[in-house]
Image (tube, helix red, strand yellow):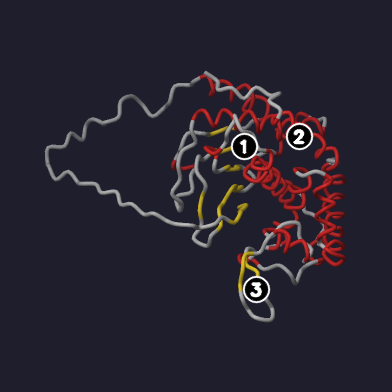
């Protein structure tokens, strides 16, 4: 599963990299140009990960660029050490510990959380004008992109939500519904309005003209985001991610601006989502939202140590 946002493509600069091949025949095949083995010595951050992720949650947090973990269809940049430390601390405080607090069960995440959390420094741009901000693979791995844009000196909750936390809740919700299915009646509420891969395009029914579909456009059609219009499973998890990362004021404003038709559709679907999380997983989304928002504010106010681990 992937989570996308739309970006503006202002310009593309393409530069070529040229390499030359060694035509000599006196190559020493018996020795590598790289010294030592392939194993990297553990640093202070690696030990912190062991104590704060792997030990308590059974999560491998990977921040080094590894070919086998990366999407080879995109040009990607490794996450820096410093930004990886900052995001790891933020994710632990706002995501992992928020679920611990809400469920009261320290084994819940250890059992269901993906076993690999992978950081990539750059975004993953698609040719269609969208940007991948997160992926989940079979319930075993979540990849977060754009890690190098984290700015610990200028924390923006809106940016953290858009690039990281909405993605984390979105992808984890996929794992939950893949483990235990939600009520199929959810899919029938707006079954004729899903548009697949063209979720980011709005077409005028009269003129046929196309433009970008905004979240506000989606509200009127009964969806909490434009991406929710891609298909029912994405719609389901977008309800969870948007609810727990936004205030009650935001949610009420969305319902108001959705109009009578859109509001009724969103509310019908969200009732199913809320009951699913409560009855299937014993997670009250109101309590989870309260914990997430409070922890976000603690990050924004500088109450959490985000210093680099030396």
Whole-Å distance between the Cαs marked 1 and 3? 41 Å
For the residues bearing labels 1 and 3, Cβ distance under 8 angstroms: no
| Label placed on residue 133 | none
| Label placed on residue 203 | 3
Q: Quarter-wise, where is residue 304 in the image?
A: top right
Whole-Å distance between the Cαs marked 2 and 1? 13 Å
Q: Quarter-wise, where is residue 195 in the image?
A: bottom right
| Horizontal side of residue 73 vs 200, given as left or right | left
| SS of the residue under disc 2 | helix
**Where does label 2 land, which residue?**
108
Q: Which numbered disc flags the more N-terminal residue, 2 or 3?
A: 2
Q: Which numbered disc flags the more N-terminal residue, 1 or 3?
A: 1
Q: Residue 157, percent across and down?
A: 69, 38
| Label placed on residue 115 | 1
| SS of the residue under disc 3 | strand
Q: Residue 104, percent across and down?
A: 82, 30
Q: Nearer the viewer, mark 1 or mark 3?
A: 3
Q: Residue 48, percent across and down?
A: 58, 21
Q: Give neighbour class at mark 2: few <14, some 14-19, many 20+ (Cα, 10 Å).
A: some
């Amino acid at each position: 599963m992937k989570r996308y946002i739309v970006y503006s493509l202002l310009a593309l600069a393409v530069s070529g990299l040229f390499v030359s091949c060694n035509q000599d025949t006196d190559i020493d095949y018996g020795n590598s140009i790289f010294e030592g083995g392939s194993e990297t010595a553990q640093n202070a951050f690696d030990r912190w990960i062991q104590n704060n992720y792997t030990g308590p949650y059974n999560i491998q947090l990977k921040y080094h660029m590894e070919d086998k973990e990366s999407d080879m269809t995109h040009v990607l940049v490794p996450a820096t050490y410093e930004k990886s430390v900052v995001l790891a601390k933020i994710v632990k405080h706002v995501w992992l510990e928020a679920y611990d607090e809400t469920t009261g069960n320290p084994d819940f995440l250890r059992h269901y959380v993906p076993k690999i959390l992978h950081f990539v420094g750059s975004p993953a741009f698609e040719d269609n004008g969208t940007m991948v901000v997160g992926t989940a693979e079979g319930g075993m791995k979540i990849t977060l992109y754009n890690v190098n844009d984290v700015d610990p000196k200028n924390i923006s909750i809106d940016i953290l939500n858009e690039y990281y936390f909405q993605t984390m809740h979105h992808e984890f919700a996929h794992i939950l519904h893949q483990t235990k299915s939600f009520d199929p009646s959810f899919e029938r509420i707006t079954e004729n309005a899903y548009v697949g891969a063209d979720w980011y395009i709005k077409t005028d029914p009269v003129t046929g003209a196309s433009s970008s579909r905004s979240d506000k456009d989606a509200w009127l059609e009964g969806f909490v985001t434009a991406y929710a219009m891609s298909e029912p499973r994405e719609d389901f998890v977008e309800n969870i991610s948007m609810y727990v990362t936004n205030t009650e004021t935001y949610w009420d404003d969305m319902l108001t601006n959705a109009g009578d038709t859109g509001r009724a559709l969103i509310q019908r679907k969200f009732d199913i989502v809320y009951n699913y999380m409560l009855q299937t997983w014993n997670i009250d989304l109101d309590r989870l939202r309260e914990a997430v928002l409070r922890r976000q504010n603690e990050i924004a106010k500088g109450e959490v140590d985000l210093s680099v681990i030396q």
